[in-house]
Each structure stands twice: as C-alpha cells, then as structure tokens.
Image (cartoon, rainbow, N blue to C red):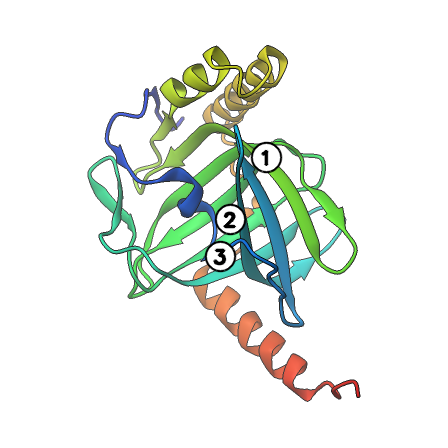
Amino acid sequence: PHRRSHGMDGVGVRWDPPYLRRTHLPRPSVTHPPGTVRIDYLRPPNRRDVFIQKLLLDTPQVKVTLAEDIPFDPPIRIQDQIALEAGSDAVWFTFPNCWHDIGHFHRADGTFTGTYANILTPPIFLPGGRWETTDLFLDVWIDLEGTLWILDRDQLLEAEEKGWISPGLAQRAREEVARIEREHKAGQWPPEVVLGWDLDRARQLSSRTTQAAERRPKSR
C-alpha cells in the first residue's frame, strides 16, 4: 500500500533549522581530523556554519556520514514527537548532483525516530574533505508510520519575499519536494541505499574509521 503524505507550513516542528543538520562547531577556522569531512553550510541570507562529520562511505553515487552526540537540549520535536535529543546520532546520505540530502534520526538510546530530507543546493566537493552547500529552507519528514510531511513552506516563502533566494531557486526547491512526494507514493523513496543502513552499521564503520586514523603514522 502507498504511504500517506501531508503538506505542512512549519506546524508541529520546533527547532532552529540550521542546527538540525549537523553537529555544530563555531565558525572560525575549523580543522577536521582524518576520516571526517568539513561541511561549510550557508543559510540565506548570510548565516554560515561549519559542521564536522565522520565519513563512512565515499562513492560516486552516495557519501554516508555520521553526526555523533548531537547537543540538543531541550529535544527537537517534529509532529510532537522527539526526533533528536542530547546525545543523539544521525546518519546522513549525501548524493552528488542532488538537490536534497537524507538523514536517519535517533534518540540518545539509539531508537530510530524517522527519516529527514533537507532541500539544498547540490554540494560542491572541494579538496581536503571540504563540502559546500546552501540550505533552501524546505524539509521533508517521514515518521515511523511511513507518513510523509512537508515542512517549512512558510520559511521558504519568507526567504523568497525578502529576496534571500531567487525565485528560480525557490521554484527548484518546490520541484524537488514534489519529486520526493511522487517517488514516495510510488514506493521509490527513500532510495535503497538509505534503507540498507541503520545506526549499528554506521557505528561499526565509525569505530573502524577512528581506529584506522589512529594507526596512520603522523607527519613530522
């Protein structure tokens, strides 16, 4: 059976959106250790943040990263349910040339809470494990019952009205959400690669990545 989908204008969602995406670090010159990526994240009109995540899988089709021990206190709620809290981990899936990424969210005890899609510009992958992208305000949430919710249409409208993003970018964000909705109804979204990961797998690979980085000889 097809899963249900509902549109929303930010109702039932309580968070400061830029902090939901990644483990947050202060903006000034941030270095990142081996086995991690640095994400330079622009939230129009002019808010810039830097986020560090462990890189678990790096292929031309998808890059899987892990945000660990996310500092949310009080918890982040979506549809009146806790999606993230202090100590939570999130597994992220970034697709080259794609206008959204996908996150698996969990509570601090590892309980899966739902799947989140962040509409953004296709990431630019720079040398040295640096990524750059721009948030396009719209988000998608799939709860534990498989219901799809479209979030923050009001924020996109405000950004468009204030000239923070162009009408073309705003329309592209809406088109991406519409595509996700269609594929979800057809049972084709999230993609198989996302369904094949859980937090246990991510943590196991994270541990191996850390051990491998520790074994590397340090440069003099």
- Type of amino acid at the residue the image marks with label 1: Thr
The numbered mark, 2 or 1, whose residue comes first in the sequence reads 1
Occupied quadrant, residue 16: top left
Q: Where is residue 128 in the image (x, y as percent from the top left)?
A: 75, 60
Decide: is 188 above or below 96: above
Examine the rendering and report whether any part of residue 188 can be seen.
Answer: no
Would residue 3 appear left or right of 119 to someone viewing this image? left
Mark 2 and mark 3: Cα distance apart in space:
32 Å
Are circles 2 and 3 on residues that touch, CB within 8 Å? no
- For the point 43% across and 31% down, the residue is 140
Occupied quadrant, residue 200: bottom left
Q: Quadrant of the C terminus?
A: bottom right
Q: What residue is pinned by disc 2?
A: 195
Mark 1 and mark 3: Cα distance apart in space:
18 Å
Decide: is 132 above or below 22: above
The numbered mark, 1 or 3, whose residue comes first in the sequence reads 3
Q: What residue is pinned by disc 1?
A: 134
